[in-house]
Image: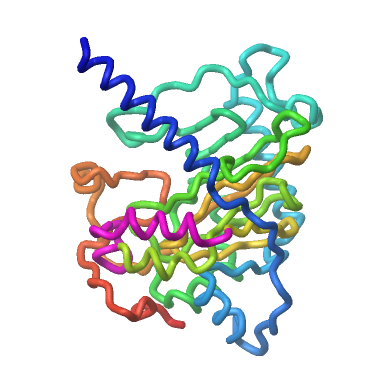
Amino acid sequence: MARAETSDQDLEASREAARRQREAQKLSQTFTMPQLPTASGEQTVSHEQIGFFKEHGFLILERLIDEDAINAAMSRIWDYVEVRIPGASESSVLRRDDPTTWRQPAFGKQPPQPKTGYYQGRVPVEYFDRTIKLHDIGTEDFLLDLLPRHPCVEAIAKRMLGPNLRPSNVTRGVYALLPGTKGRSAKGSMLGPHTDQVCQQLNTCAYLNDVEPRGGGFTVYPGSHRIMFQAHETEANFSPNAHFRERMRKVVNTIEPYELCAPKGSVIFWHGRTVHSPGIHLGDNIRWALFGDYSLDHPVLDDDEHRACGQYEWFKNTRLFREDHFITEDMWRGWSI
């Protein structure tokens, strides 16, 4: 009995330490992209924009996607939401024309994660707290054309990463952050800093609405890509080394995160090793974003091999490279920048 009591006390102490650590996290500051010289002639991005990306790990290009295309996409996304996202009751069902249904939503029961098959490890549609992730809609052509296959977006990805890109067959889907109760104040504990797994080179986030300060903007830890690149064995594959946790703590404890604010149609390009988080949302509107991934078109593991090593993520366009280079001091070795 004494051992059980000690175990319970240790567990409670661990939980309390984790809670204090979350409370001590640095609060994000809102960030808008500074005016940099833009590309000219046949260029897709300027030298200054590339320099910003290399230094900070992200780049925002405002209004890159046509507003009419986004409005058409949002109509179809809402059609999907109203069918696929259950409310806990009839009165709590989300309605596109009724903002009162958006605040602090009460969702129906979330199905369990599939343990086998194509959707193994991640439900096709997630809804929890104030978050919705529409993963399975990510294979729709209208979303692929909106972001990863968009001529301007793809051209910039080729300029940064290289011309031989893996074909874009899926996006991560549409992620929505819904407003919470009124009167809340921003806290560092509202952030969830993390890095992604599988193979990470160049990622994108398209804003499908105007994202104002404290409106749930995608949040990044600027410069963290340079720290976390050295926390892996190889350049692109998820391959954490013995310093991974230490370097992650360094990022969270020393870097002030940026909450990225930008108008509808803006696209955020971010290095795959960048530590990031959902943004703090104190506003009244839903923050809608579409996420995509780019990688070079190298030979990759098949799905069963990904399952065997615990890296099967069907909703991402990237896969583990069969051969990946060990890291050096040159983190841009395989890029075009």
Q: Is residue 219 magenta?
A: no
Q: Locate residue 59 relative to residue 307 in the image: left or right.
A: right
Residue in the picture at 42% in, 70% down: 226
**Relative height, residue 228 to residue 35 (above, below):** above
Q: Locate residue 300 relative to residue 104 in the image: left or right.
A: left
Coloring applied to the structure: rainbow
Residue in the picture at 54% in, 54% down: 144
Q: Is residue 253 magenta?
A: yes
Q: How many marks?
A: 0
**Relative height, residue 39 to residue 137 (above, below):** below
The image quadrant of residue 256 is bottom right
Q: Locate residue 77 relative to residue 270 in the image: left or right.
A: right
**Relative height, residue 63 to residue 134 (above, below):** below
Q: Nearer the viewer, residue 180 or 105?
A: 180
Which portion, as a residue range, is magenta?
232-256
Q: Is residue 148 visible?
A: no
Residue in the picture at 48% in, 38% down: 136
Task: Tell me where residue 111 appears, x and y as whole percent.
Answer: 44, 21
Residue reaching furthest front? 2
Q: Is residue 321 visible?
A: yes
Task: Tell me where residue 298 appears, x and y as whole percent.
Answer: 29, 67
Task: Tell me where residue 126 appears, x and y as whole percent.
Answer: 50, 32
The quarter in which the N terminus is drawn is top left
Q: Nearer the viewer, residue 18 or 13?
A: 13
Residue reaching furthest bottom? 41
Residue in the picture at 68% in, 20% down: 93
Task: Tell me where residue 23 appears, x and y as whole percent.
Answer: 55, 41
**Relative height, residue 246 to residue 4 (above, below):** below
